[in-house]
Amino acid sequence: MIKNRIKKLRELMKINKIDVYYVPTDDDHMSEYVADHFKSREYITGFTGSAGVCVITLKEAGLWTDGRYFTQAENQLKNSGVTLYKQRQAGVINFEDFIAEKLPKNGVLGFDGKVVNEMTKERLLSFIDKKNGKIVLDKDLIGEIWENREDIPLDKCFILADKYTGESSSKKIVRLREKMKEENSDVLIFSSLEDVCWLFNLRGSDVENTPLTYSYAILEKDSVTLYINSNKLDSKVNKELLKNNVVIKEYDEIQNDLYKLNNKVVWLEKSCLNSFLYSQINDTNTIIDKVNPTKLFRAVKNKIQIKNIRNAHLKDGIAMTKFLYYVKNNIGKEEMSEISVSEYLENLRRQQEGFITPSFNTISAYKGNAAMMHYSANEESNAILKPEGFLLVDSGGTYFDGTTDITRTITLGKISDEDKKLYTLVLKGMLSLMRAKFLYGTTGINLDILARGPLWQHDIDYQCGTGHGVGFVMSVHEGPQNIRWGHNPNAAVIEEGMVVTDEPGVYIANKIGIRIENELLAVNLTKNFYGQFMGFETITYCPIDLDAVDVKYLTNEDLETLNSYHKMVFEKISPFLDKKEKAWLKIQTRMIKK
């Protein structure tokens, strides 16, 4: 099937005189997760991971993805005619160099400019200039061969009330205009779905498990315009938008309005605005390519949001604790599979007040399947659980009062001493980051070694970041803050009110996957002569499986951190459990020592 699709694509490439065709994972807004309509890379390669790019020439096809997906991609690309290129591995060519190498002199690189951001387009142009090549950005060739392609969603939107967001849309507009004044900007373009939805307190269901709606916005000194399919807006939403003097236009009208801009100072993000829309802005305008200020605004949660987030985590912790009780007490007594326990957990979350949707597709992975960081069980891979080994469950929920993300690796029965060692090293790193104290000005680059260090001491690493920001009733992955190592001159400073995850892990292909994840809220501590000291408040409330802990790898400080955390979990969760669950939780959160 994949080979046939690639054959049809190559026929169209020849007709359109395109030598190399580039297919990213993105939608028109550069979203991390996209609606089915935009899954062109998945359609042409068969690889279902959420990250990766494909390059197809008239003779070759390649897929580039990162370490989270190596094992998954190897399996899904078998017999497809698509070669896997493992990103950031020694000796592996990157996709830009591949394009430059394969493009003939005076050749043509083609892509759908609506799903390729302007920054990427300019970078690709610099690579193909060596061949005197050119780019054609108005060819959605995948769309031409895609039979029964899903439409762009038209589900209704809703306004998230101020009692949840803590700030009205009108106040946000005032804050943003102050930032525009600082930059001497006439126009601020909102192209990412999170930025638009944050600005108007608007939420939807266009992207699976992410309450966003396909839309754009433009803010000027005396007007603000929302570009959205009007069928998505009911009278209540319309009334709220009009109350804030929002001009409502159809989704595609942004193209014409960008074309009409003349002699303006336009603030946009080339990494977020698609290259087709960017091409509509004429040269009389001055471009400021800078991160949209909404990113930092929405990353720093206000007091009302923080109160709501804690409540969302309490509800989520109740569901998770009941889930762990069910799995640990019924394994070997009734048939369980990766899918069935995932469905059981989702049902527990749905019973909680204010639940909207899972915050992402649950990763329920048994034994070797857990080595694939973003594994997704299907009818073919769905493993039956046995009273032995590890089950890794990475999941979350979005409620009206917050979004959660939690991972627990659960012992189902007998495990080896080596398994316990690896589990405890992961736990050790997680606890180390959890209790971090640091001066203001610190970034996630500075903090990453706290979580990764215990594994590095044993020559082990994980090929992903340690933590990411979490949106408020939006995307489960949010910037600009993160916890990861490597060179990044633009790394975000950790600010009070930011939420980050703490999720080190171990992944050994086809053998084992271990990850433990809590969410942390950045808080101010002591301020003195040296500056503002900061730390983290743990806002995930759920027991960590002590059956897999080997205390000889933990220090007294580690044990104190773990015991203190479990004391808090019991105090917060036990009032919401029945008698048997409460007795079980008491054992699961017991104090341990050497």
Image: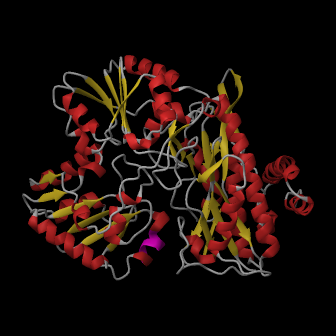
The image position of residue 313, as x and y in percent, is: 71, 47
Seen as rendered, the residue at the extreme left is: 106
Residue at 34% x, 83% y is 79
153 is within the stretch colored magenta? no
Q: Which residues are magenta?
A: 70-74
Q: On the picture, is 98 further left or further right than 428?
A: left
Magenta span: chief secondary structure: helix
- Can you give x and y, in whole percent of width and height, for residue 116 in the image? 29, 50
State the residue in front, 31 or 102: 31
Residue 437 visible? The answer is no
Can you say whether 328 is above or below 538 in the image?
A: below
Which sits in the foreground, 211 or 61?
211
Q: Quadrant of the N terminus?
A: bottom left
Q: Quadrant of residue 223?
A: top left
Q: Is residue 426 above or below residue 182?
A: below
Residue 52 appearing in the image? yes
Q: How many marks?
A: 0
253 and 185: which one is in front? Answer: 253
Q: From what the image shows, is residue 495 above or below residue 484?
A: above
User: Closer to the camera, 480 or 462?
Assistant: 480
